[in-house]
Image (cartoon, helix red, strand yellow):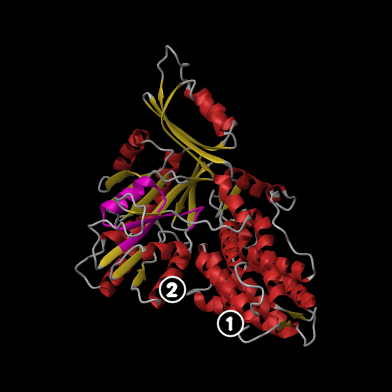
Amino acid sequence: MKTINSRQLKALLNSASNNLFNHYPEVDALNVFPVPDGDTGINMNLTLTSGANEINELPDDSDVYTIAKTFAHGLLMGARGNSGVITSQIFRGFASALEGAKEVDALLLAQAFKAGSDTAYKAVMRPVEGTILTVIRESSVALNKQVKEGMSIEKTFELLLKEANKSLVRTPELLPILKEVGVVDSGGTGLVRIIEGMLLAAKDEFVQRNKDSMESNVMSAAAASIAEEEFGYCTEFIMSLGPDSVKKIFNQKRFTKWLNDHGNSLVVVRDEEIVKVHVHTLTPGEILNYAQQYGEFLKLKIENMTEQHHALENGAKVEAHVDLVNEEVEKEEDIPEYVDEHNAIIAVSSGSGISQYFKEIGVTLIVSGGQTMNPSSEDFLAAINKLDTDNIFILPNNSNIVMAANQAADLANESGRNVFVIPSKTIPQGIVAALNFDPETDPEENLKNMKLSLKRIKSGEITFSIRDCEIGGLKIAKDDFIGIYEKDIVSGSKDKFECLLDLLDKMVDSDSALLTIFLGDDVKREELFETKKEIERRYPDLNIDIKEGHQNIYSFLIGIE
């Protein structure tokens, strides 16, 4: 075909969304670090799904510009993670190039992708080459050099896809960490899948959402492992053991092995006669029946993780959980009385203990999120709209959430709100920024002081490796614990406490005064006793503050001031 009309453009964009859905696990598996939080694919997938959901509500007689603009707006609102935000900006620029057009020919299509590249680059303060930005720039520039008047739409997309794949293959040469780990860029891979989906629709091979995509041959073994862990039922319970006269004698080793054979992401913590369990399983009933042989439940929660997957198949929205602190909120107008009418702080938190501490230091509203589930721009807007205050400060507390927060703040400010984003990239940074907020100071001075405070704290974390690898000369085996200092993996050990000590050796210096450690769900405070004594011996002048964070994935979150 020589041109694209509005109906065809809608089909192309839906096909792109579906194709990304079918392949997002393989995109997740390209995470350069071997940590259990590869989420580029799911972020881009949720972003594209939001856009598709928007255009499918449009009437059939909508013009191509309306289709493109509405799709871009849906991406903008649903954007999650840096990759999702950049994708939304690509299609924002793409849409702007179609203004006034009734149909799209090859020349205009090439110009639209180039406009998308330009817009995306402008949206990123410090563009990094070897990423999705490189892929869209190189492929769109190459396309504009090769496209000719009268060229078919199919041929145009074939050229774009060919150049995008060539650019993707080159990403490891531009970004050394990709070359070291032996992967191509994940965001660039997602973009290639988007272009591929559009091409297939142009060739009358519209891509349907494949409900069995988790088992498709294109997915790597690593992706299959991740997908297996992400779906099923998140099952949590607290159980009181005994009495022995009517219940089986509890053997923790045997109990843990059985649960591990019937699920994953397992955490079992025993405190005298109380056992706390977290497990992901496809058969929660079996888990509960087995556990009840040893005691009775005090608290029980089961969440269907597959429900989100199925909702995505049907184009439904997935929203982050937003809570006003110290209040059971069922309606948006239910604002706690103590909220300052002039100032409010929104913070992203990844654990109940961390959330509680944020409340104690003056945070007004919590957005649940972090690794594996990044809040969208729309989630932040929903949080902003819950607050009727003069000034709102947002603490994203994750490098992959800052762009979505900024995008939401821009949208809010355009509507007359006064919203500031403090670019905190870790939980410790968010905490120190919140502590440096002064309600008696004007917002610009608070913004300055809170940003400056981010430089006064070092951040570290302990998690586990999902695969064998070698990074920076450090050999790491699957399931080993790894220590991350800022953005670098600097330690590895089969013992989480040894890994913690090794990480601290890399972080603590003569200027260090305060060490704060947030314990994850897999660590009990009493387990840290001997390690704490060793920390005190090594660093006698260091003040140590240990808190229950209850975050998952990360055994320890560390801040050093």
Residue drawn where x is 26% and y is 59% of the image: 435
Distance between mark 2 and mark 1 Cα atoms: 17 Å
**Amino acid bearing label 2:** Leu
Location of mark 2 (residue): 411
Q: Which residue is at the front of the view, 409 or 446?
A: 409
Task: Inspect the magenta stretch and tell me whether residue 363 lies in it.
Answer: yes
Residue 130 appears in view = no
Residue 498 % position (x, y):
43, 40
Residue at mark 1: 96
Label 2: how many Cα within 10 Å (few below 14, some 14–19, many 20+): some
Percent coordinates x, y for residue 39 in the rendering = 56, 55
Which range of residues does the magenta coloring cover?
345-374
The quadrant the C terminus occupies is bottom left
Residue drawn at the location 48% of the way across and 16% of the way down: 248
**Residue nearer the viewer, 460 or 101:** 101
Determine the image quadrant of residue 151.
bottom right
Quadrant in the picture for the N terminus: bottom right
Residue under the point 70% across and 70% down: 12
Residue at (31, 48) in percent of width and height: 356
Height in image: 233 above or below 95?
above
Q: Nearer the viewer, residue 538 or 237?
A: 237
